[in-house]
Image (cartoon, grey):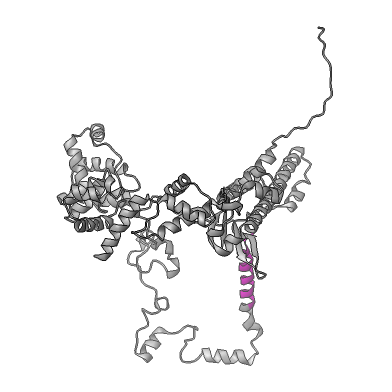
Amino acid sequence: MKLSANLLLRQTQSLVMTPQLMQSIQLLQMTHFELNQFIALEVEKNPLLEFPSNDGETGGERGEAEDGEYAHQPEDAGSDDGYDNRSEALSSDWYDNGGSASTSRLNDELDANYTNVFPDDGAPQRLDAPELVSQWKSMPGSGEGADYDLDDFVAGQVLLRDHLAQQIPFVLPDMADRLIAQNFVDQLDDCGYLQADIVEAGERLGTSLAQAERVLATLQSLDPLGVFARSLAECLAIQLRQKDRYDPAMQALVENLELLARRDFASLKRLCGVDEEDLLDMLGEIRQLNPKPGSGFEAGVSEAITPDVVVRSASDGGWLVELNPDTLPRVLVNQSYFSRVTKTKDAEVQAFLSDCLQSANWLTRSLDQRANTIMKVASEIVRQQDAFLLHGVDYLRPLNLKTVAEAIKMHESTVSRVTSNKYMLTPRGLFELKYFFTVSISAVAGGDSHSAEAVRHKIRALILQESPEAVLSDDDIVDMLKKGGVDLARRTVAKYREAMNIASSVQRRREKRALAKVVGF
């Protein structure tokens, strides 16, 4: 075959992910915090982008202008009789010539001491040591009341490690023991449990096993009780020893917590050697203990969730859906600055500013498109879940991404990005947008399908209403759900029950009977 080179012209279509398109997709799935960080970086890089001016500054300028007008008002109104009468009233016996109340005159005529009531009105206090004013703010005469900052008086958050570090010097005077103790403190988790091997810790620090165990035993006596425990059983045992309640029967109960988790009270009575009444008293004492002694000391700062969409009741009986103004990014393109700077004849500067203008306009359009997309998805969700907003979770409809995407004429991936890490504030509470998308469960006799979340809520409600004498099994729950029009298999009921951390019918029966006897006693 003869080979030859040819020139061909071919026209094809292809989908190319441009940088601008990738940026729009990223903006769509960003959270409020991530979006603010991204915009702040763009404002730093792009000289044409800027944040809008604060409304408070305008009010401040207005206030200064009003103060200025008010300051010149007495000169213009000097001939006013009302103003003369006010001047005569102010020059009465209660006021001195300077226009301020005389503290000494008030003290003499009212037989009272107003020096402490109005400290700013008295004579200035003499400095005890003028050379130390910069070092000691609390020195008398060193400053006025306006210099105080409320942030200086706010108590800082005490961490678990700081709380323990304050107690260690009082129980461990030896520096070698303190070094071992500090190593143990560094290996505590958020719940206060020690995540270290004593043997390995002793070898790493070059100390004996006996010394490490002695230091650990001393640390386990610190506050909060139960800290430095290596297991749940040891944590409960430490607290029971402090209360002088760690007798052989209680020791057997603590060492067999797996039987307590299974509600096997018959085996526990046999192992502890007690009757049913004593076992119930022991269980009551166990419930009063703290299984997580370090939980009272937060390791991080809790951040509040800011809703992206707010839903309110409308006057016509419908729902008013609007974006939260606190989460909407505010950024402007400075067109006037661009017009002034582009007058230069430098081609490199003009090309740079043209790129900046194009990037700024694309960012503002992307932010506007992001807001419109969130609004469309949220409005469709509210329309689909109108019964849930009116009556509660029992009326939550099954919904998927395809249904919403077809309704708003968008792709499913777009709806998925919008509903990721976005929250909606409704009269029923604060929910993530993905909460409204649940699996559909078929109904009996071809009726309307049910939402999986609504079915889980029904299972939880049925279990909460059961009595100790009539505990529902999974088969009983299946039969009751079928009477309510929900066709569900027994293994699905068991899966939902375990996902909600609800024990089996045998364990629930033992626990409810035990609780009933405790109430009876």
How many numbered circles are shown?
0
On the image, the x and y values in percent for residue 465 come to 41, 61
The range drawn in magenta is 52-69
> Relative to the observer, which residue lies in front, 168 or 228?
228
On the image, the x and y values in percent for residue 249 come to 17, 51
Answer left or right for 196 relative to 172: right
* Quadrant location, the N terminus: top right
Q: Residue at x 52, y 88 (%)?
A: 90
Answer left or right for 398 relative to 471: right
- 63 drawn magenta: yes
Vertical placement of residue 131 versus 265, above or below: below
Q: Name the dominant secondary structure of the magenta segment.
A: helix
On the image, the x and y values in percent for residue 203 come to 23, 31
Q: Residue at x 82, y 25 (%)?
A: 10
Q: Is residue 132 visible in this depiction of the protein?
A: yes
Residue at the far top: name it: 1
> Relative to the observer, which residue lies in front, 111 or 381?
381
* Quadrant location, the C terminus: bottom left
Q: Residue at x 62, y 83 (%)?
A: 74
Query: Which quarter of the picture shows residue 55?
Result: bottom right
> Relative to the observer, which residue lies in front, 104 or 352?
352
Q: Is residue 237 visible in this depiction of the protein?
A: no
Answer left or right for 384 relative to 95: right
On the image, the x and y values in percent for residue 299 come to 38, 50
- 518 drawn magenta: no
